[in-house]
Amino acid sequence: MPRHKSIAKRPPPFRNFDFLLVPIYARFSSHLHPALTVVQPLHTHLLESCRESELPPGPPTLPIIGNLHLFPTKSPHLKFTEWARTYGGIYSLKIGLGTVIVVTDPNVVKELLEKKSGSTSDRPAIYFVELVTRGLHVALARYAHSILTAQAAERHLPIQQAEAAQLLYDILCTPEGFFTHGRRYSSSVIMSVLYGKRAPRYETPETTLFFRMWHEWTALLEPGATPPIDLIPLLRFFPPWPTKWKRAATRIRAWQRDLYFRLLGQTEDRLRRGEPNGSYMEEVVRKQKEFGLDRETAAYFAGALIEGGSDTTSTYLNSFILCMVAHPHVQKRAQEEIDRIIHRFRPVAPLLFPHAATKSERYLNYMIPNGSTIFVNRWGIFHDPDVYEDPESFLPERLLLTENGTKPGLETSSLKPTLSFGVGRRACAGIHVAQNSININVMNLLWAFDFKPPVDLEGNVIEPDLWGQGITTDPLPFECQITPRTREKAELIRQEFFDATDVFEKFEFGLSSEDREFVAQSRRRSSM
């Protein structure tokens, strides 16, 4: 990344900013700018929205609004990457009086967010999120890392492998439903690991409730879905009846509490009956006093982990299938290697969520003000043409040439492959469980199936719509042809699913009558 002299005095007292609101502010800036211009003479101090002298460089600002007018309403990571090519691996943006620091250099990530994580690992406050969660998602992060260790994740490999066997079986039986099969898998794994209760169907009540909540929750975090509440605090005091977003927040909160307390109560009941099965929440319940947790915080502790694990893993799996459909030569080469090494079936989360500085820090000649929001632009890091040859192309074989797939001869010790899971104290607590799921399923899917694009009645390939533009880069729902690679593999998939019964049964307490009937029918069919 190019270096530039700092072009921009004291840190502003503004913290209520989150990257999700940046495009929202941009969308409303055309309405805000005239109003703010009227009051400008009465508030000349708002000119501090210009860049302070010790900040990293960045795009030119306007009085009062700073860089608000420049933000895109879609795919902010692409604009962040474009700016990084101009202003360097660390640059700043001004949103009113607020400061945003964007990092697109792994060396800066290491020095600023890892070595100084004690003061750069807070989360920016955002009113809409606070309205739903009351801040409990962030407050409980420290407990997760003390429980979700690599050693603990090893205990849960059997249920991950069993659920992976069902994923193959589900795709074998109804390949057109692969999109929801991946969601069922990820939901069932995280519920089994956390609560000791699995989801045998996508229609399992807890899974249905979660995805209903999650889809509305993330939709309201999309650019422009809510007004700029943090920029205009007066909006917080509007009553619910004329404010759709407040009614939605109440509805989402009710769904969350229904799900989280239902699952916690079932875990507590099982422990009282003396029927533990090794779930994480059993340990949390036992150590509530030691952790200083009341029942409310215990419920939200696991709820935050469900949200982190149910959607991201399925997004990865569906993205993987999309890549295989789009790149058949890569699929074929990977299948050949798996066949050569393994011979048979052996079962084996663009922008990171932002940080916030809790005190002022220096990096090189730059000041990172207290309260500033810090983005790690992962997309820009992994699409740097100075580091990667042809970064826009899907070339997994680049990882065979160098450890991190970079151009030969570069010093890349700061470039960690786990960057996708976050950095510093904000790294994903469930990284070990997530990596196990990815490794198991990528190999299984390549071993078991061929993935091809769909064709129309005339035999022409139908191209998928590819990616969404929300806060996660999920592939849009797409069609593809999925077929077992051989008849023998199909039979082995059925056998492995049936053989997983003993593992499943430990996690099938409290299932609905519909779930129990589904389980019984599935096992009868797989044994035939």
Image (tube, rainbow, N blue to C red):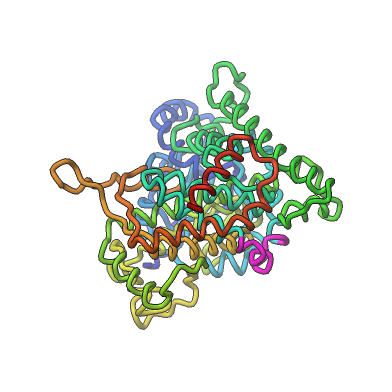
Residue toward you, 445 or 354: 445
Q: Can residue 104 be seen by looking at this rendering?
A: no
Residue at image coords 35%, 57%: 484
- Where is residue 320 drawn, in percent x and y? 39, 57
Which range of residues does the magenta coloring cover?
146-158
Q: Is-magenta flag for residue 37?
A: no
Question: How would you classify the magenta stretch by its main secondary structure?
Answer: helix
Task: Give the side of residue 292 with respect to residue 438, left or right.
Answer: right
Pick whichever, 243 or 235, lies toward us.
243
Between residues 120 and 136, which one lies in front from this camera angle?
Answer: 136
Task: Please state if 1 lies on the left or on the right of 365 as rendered.
Answer: left
The image shows residue 499 at horizontal and vertical percentages of 56, 59
Residue drawn 53% across the image and 47% down it: 524
Of residues 289 and 364, the one drawn nearer to the viewer in this rendering? 289
Where residue 129 sits, quadrant-wise, is top right
Is residue 272 among the parts visible in the rendering?
A: yes
Q: Where is residue 374 in the image (x, y as percent from the top left)?
A: 53, 54
The quarter of the picture where the N terminus appears is: bottom left
The residue depicted at 75 percent of the width and 44 percent of the height is: 297
Residue 484, relative to residue 520: is it above or below? below
